[in-house]
Amino acid sequence: MSRRQELNQIYKEIKIEAGVYQIRNTKNGKIWVAGTNNLKTINGKRFELQMGTSYNKTLQQEWKEYGEDAFVFEILEKIEPKEDPYYDLKDVISKREAFWIEKLEPFGEKGYNSVRK
């Protein structure tokens, strides 16, 4: 097996975990809550902020103002997929994200999420 094939096999065997996470500003306590089907995308979100390309302008501005060290990335919940053919992981993630947003209320002075209508 070539090195490339070996790396492809390892990649396929890596368990992908879905869940809900938050980015918390340790200086002012504001948070941003998001759900994802792959918690490894947290690294992509960090990279966006480092590059100044986040679509969340308020979060991006405060990242620039306070610096990267003022922010922590925390997993709020991991979601285990089920083998049931009627199980809709995307829907479950959306509902759990809504649960955490309702619970934590990351709006205005408390966070970076926008109020859903």
Image: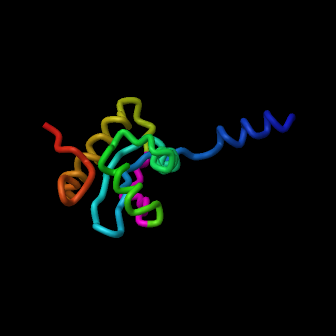
The quadrant holding residue 13 is top right
Q: Is residue 72 magenta?
A: yes
Please tell me which residue is depicted at 31% across the width and 36% down the height of the picture: 91
Give the farthest residue toward the left.
117
- In the picture shown, does residue 89 fall above or below 29? above
Taking depth in this image into account, of 25 and 14 the one nearest to the observer is 25
Residue 62 percent location from the top left of the image: 34, 56
Query: For the point 33% across and 51% down, which residue is it?
Result: 59
**Is the image coloured rainbow, by chain, by secondary structure, or in one colour?**
rainbow
Q: Main secondary structure of the magenta part?
A: strand
Instruction: In the rendered view, tell whether residue 86 sits above or below residue 32.
Output: above
Coordinates of residue 88 in the picture (x, y in percent): 35, 33
Residue drawn at 23 percent across, 55 percent down = 106
Asked if the stretch drawn in magenta spans residue 6, the answer is: no
Which residues are the magenta region?
70-80
Which residue is at the front of the view, 115 or 9? Answer: 115
Q: Residue furthest right?
A: 1
- The residue nearer to you, when weighing 110 against 88, is 110
Dividing the picture into quadrants, the one containing residue 8 is: top right
Report whether 15 appears left or right of 36.
right
Please provide percent x and percent y for residue 115.
17, 44
Question: The N terminus lies in which quarter of the figure?
Answer: top right
In this view, 17 is above or below 110: above
- Determine if residue 56 is in view: yes
Q: Left or right: where does residue 57 sit relative to residue 53?
A: left
Residue at 45% across, 48% down? 49
Left or right of 9, for residue 48: left
Locate residue 81, reporting x and y percent: 43, 43
The quadrant of the image that shows the C terminus is top left
